[in-house]
């Protein structure tokens, strides 16, 4: 009932069209009775009494009714499906807005391809159910009642005999329904798996080609493909048993009408005209019953799709803490107090971390991979919720600050730069959407990318391709720096911002980064220690704990982990 209530919510904006669609479908169902009624009148009256003129007029009238029926069916097919499409679009919008509000942890555990499958194929099935569902349930039910009454008026005993077969049809349908639903749900999952594998393979096609691993990717894809075939096989097996079983029972209807009607005709309990009309009219009863049975498959697809849609819609979104306040521009004093966090329960990545980063200071984090450096960077913007302890900005717990105003104060430059398949201008504007062209150009100049942009034929209107594929690594990095310049945050996080670049490019980028850091509290995660020698303070993190902390000179004098790492890198260089 709760599922139905949530589904009906999407009908409300289209209630006028929905009512018109149902009335049109009802009219089509009612007009279907006209043909057998005319047939019965002809056989019982017009033909025996040789009323040829009335026969012609009856045919013309029937043709006129069929023209009306054709127009009504066009309305049902076009407007009814468009209603379903609009409902689908609303669900897609709701899902997208919800996805935008979900925490990082959701995307850590869900593949992009599977999410896309729910937004495309699942919603398509829901759209079909939205249009055909009420039509099949309401109109078919009315058709069954009307046809039963009409057949009963011809011959009640023969009608009751036919109607007695309906319970057997329902028993078969219900017994096979559960298996079909389970099978189609697994089929949905396999389709999502295929989409996920495809999305992953296409996104990584350059890596695949570089390492000549096309055969390996094909093997991985074929594993999902085989599961898809197996799942569809089960689904179609269940569907085949469902349809063949129900079709067999409906065939029995015709056999019963043939035998029972023949016996009634032989015994004089029914006239030849009424018997002929009954044979013609039995489809009025069988057709809506078969429609409802066939609808089971669409119903299963639609319900399964809606359940998967609700799985995402019911995933808790990021929400500000009760009483959270909007803040303006922060000064940038960051303090961690006994912070503990783990991505999985019972597996802490950080354990009782305490550190203090003064306003406008440059603080560096170094240490082995997996030690917790990036986790610290993710906790400051409140991307993940700390398990214990607290993080303060200018003395305020970040949980007491609205996430939007908090994140407006933080700029992040990462190793893995994400750029949109849009123009250079649009990608820089992502830092602040209301910026002027002059401000965009100024940000590009400060990031040392303006001169390169002006060498391009379309300049700032140049489309850079998916993930900035038409730019070099250094150009993408400088574009991301320009984006942060435009944002002008109080706090800057540089998470391995230059580790993927060669030494020459890094030197070019470093000037832009130094300019970006000026006047801001900066947290730097670095692999190359030469880039953080001038940091005000450096912390060594290993196994989720701070093992050393101090200036570069102090840590070298300490002759611990940092000094060892520095000497090793110095020897390498």
Image: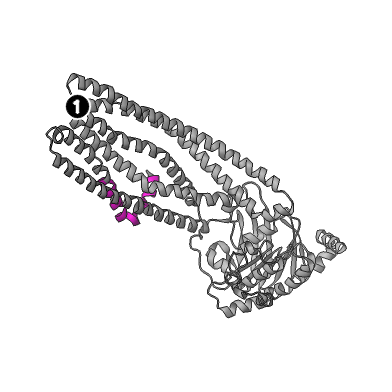
Magenta highlight on residue 13: yes
Q: Quadrant of residue 504?
A: bottom right
Q: Which residue is mark 1?
A: 272
- List x then y, in percent, for residue 106: 56, 52
Q: What percent of the width, then of the height, locates residue 566?
A: 83, 63
- Is 62 included in the stretch rendered in magenta? no
Residue 195 is situated, as x and y percent measured from the top left of the image, at: 57, 48
Secondary element at image label 1: helix
Q: Residue visible at 62% across and 75% down?
A: 459
Work out whether 151 lies above or below 396: above
Q: Toward the viewer: 292 or 10?
A: 292
Circle 1 crowding by C-alpha within 10 Å: few under 14, some 14–19, many from 20: some
Secondary structure, magenta segment, majority class: helix
Look at the picture and state if 129 lies above or below 268. below
**Which sits in the foreground, 149 or 359?**
149
Give the quarter of the image for residue 59.
top left
The image shows residue 228 at horizontal and vertical percentages of 56, 40
Residue in the picture at 22% in, 41% down: 34
Q: Is residue 119 left or right of residue 160?
A: right
* 409, 284: nearer the viewer: 284
Q: Which residues are magenta?
A: 2-27
**Does any portion of residue 553 appear in the rendered image?**
yes
- Image quadrant holding the N terminus, namely top left
The colour scheme used here is one colour
Image quadrant in which the C terminus is located: bottom right
Seen from the viewer's position, the closer of residues 356 and 223 is: 223
- Image quarter for residue 422? bottom right
Q: Residue at x 74, y 52 (%)?
A: 211
Q: Give the residue at x 56% y 36%.
A: 230
């Amino acid at each position: 009932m709760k599922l139905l209530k949530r589904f009906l919510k999407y009908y409300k904006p289209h209630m006028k069209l929905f009512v018109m669609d149902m009335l049109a479908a009802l009219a089509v169902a009612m007009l279907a009775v006209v043909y057998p009624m005319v047939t019965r009148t002809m056989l019982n009256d017009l033909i025996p009494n040789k009323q040829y003129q009335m026969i012609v007029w009856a045919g013309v009238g029937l043709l006129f009714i069929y023209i009306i029926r054709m127009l009504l069916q066009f309305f049902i097919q076009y407007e009814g499906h468009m209603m379903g499409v609009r409902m689908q679009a609303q669900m897609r919008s709701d899902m997208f807005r919800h996805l935008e509000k979900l925490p990082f942890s959701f995307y850590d555990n869900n593949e992009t391809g599977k999410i896309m499958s729910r937004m495309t194929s699942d919603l398509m099935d829901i759209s079909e159910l939205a249009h055909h569902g009420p039509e099949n349930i309401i109109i078919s039910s009315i058709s069954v009642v009307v046809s039963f009454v009409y057949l009963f008026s011809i011959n009640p005993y023969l009608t009751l005999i036919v109607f007695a077969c309906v319970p057997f049809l329902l028993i078969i349908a219900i017994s096979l329904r559960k298996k079909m639903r389970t099978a189609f749900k697994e089929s949905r999952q396999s389709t999502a798996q295929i989409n996920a594998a495809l999305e992953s393979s296409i996104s990584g096609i350059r890596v695949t080609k570089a390492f000549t691993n096309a055969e390996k990717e094909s093997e991985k894809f074929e594993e999902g493909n085989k599961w898809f075939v197996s799942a569809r096989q089960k689904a179609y097996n269940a569907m085949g048993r469902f349809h063949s079983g129900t079709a067999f029972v409906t065939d029995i209807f015709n056999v019963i009408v043939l035998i029972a009607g023949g016996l009634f005709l032989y015994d004089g309990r029914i006239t030849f005209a009424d018997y002929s009309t009954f044979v013609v009219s039995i489809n009025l009863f069988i057709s809506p019953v078969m429609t409802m049975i066939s609808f089971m498959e669409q119903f299963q697809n639609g319900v399964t799709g809606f359940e998967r849609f609700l799985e995402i819609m019911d995933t808790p979104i990021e929400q500000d803490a009760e009483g959270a306040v909007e803040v303006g521009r922060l000064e940038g004093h960051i303090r961690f107090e006994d912070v503990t966090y783990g991505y999985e329960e019972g597996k802490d990545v950080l354990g009782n971390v305490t550190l203090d980063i003064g306003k406008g200071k440059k603080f560096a984090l170094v240490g082995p991979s997996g030690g917790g450096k990036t986790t610290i960077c993710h906790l400051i913007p409140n991307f993940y919720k700390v398990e214990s302890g607290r993080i303060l900005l200018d003395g305020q717990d970040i949980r007491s600050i609205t996430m939007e105003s908090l994140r407006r104060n933080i700029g992040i430059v990462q190793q893995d730069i994400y750029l949109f398949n849009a123009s250079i201008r649009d990608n820089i504007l992502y830092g602040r959407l209301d910026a002027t062209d002059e401000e965009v150009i100024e940000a590009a100049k400060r990031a040392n990318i303006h001169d390169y942009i002006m060498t391009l034929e379309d300049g700032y209107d140049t489309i850079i391709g998916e993930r900035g594929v038409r730019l070099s690594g250094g150009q993408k990095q400088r574009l991301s720096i320009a984006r942060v310049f435009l944002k002008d945050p109080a706090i800057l996080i540089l998470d391995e911002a230059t580790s993927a670049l060669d030494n020459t490019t890094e030197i070019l980028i470093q000037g832009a980064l130094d300019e970006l850091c000026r006047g801001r509290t900066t947290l730097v995660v670095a692999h190359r220690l030469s880039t953080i020698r001038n940091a005000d303070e450096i912390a060594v993190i290993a196994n989720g704990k701070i093992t050393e902390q101090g200036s570069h000179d102090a840590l070298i004098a300490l002759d611990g982990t940092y000094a060892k790492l520095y000497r090793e890198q110095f020897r390498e260089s």
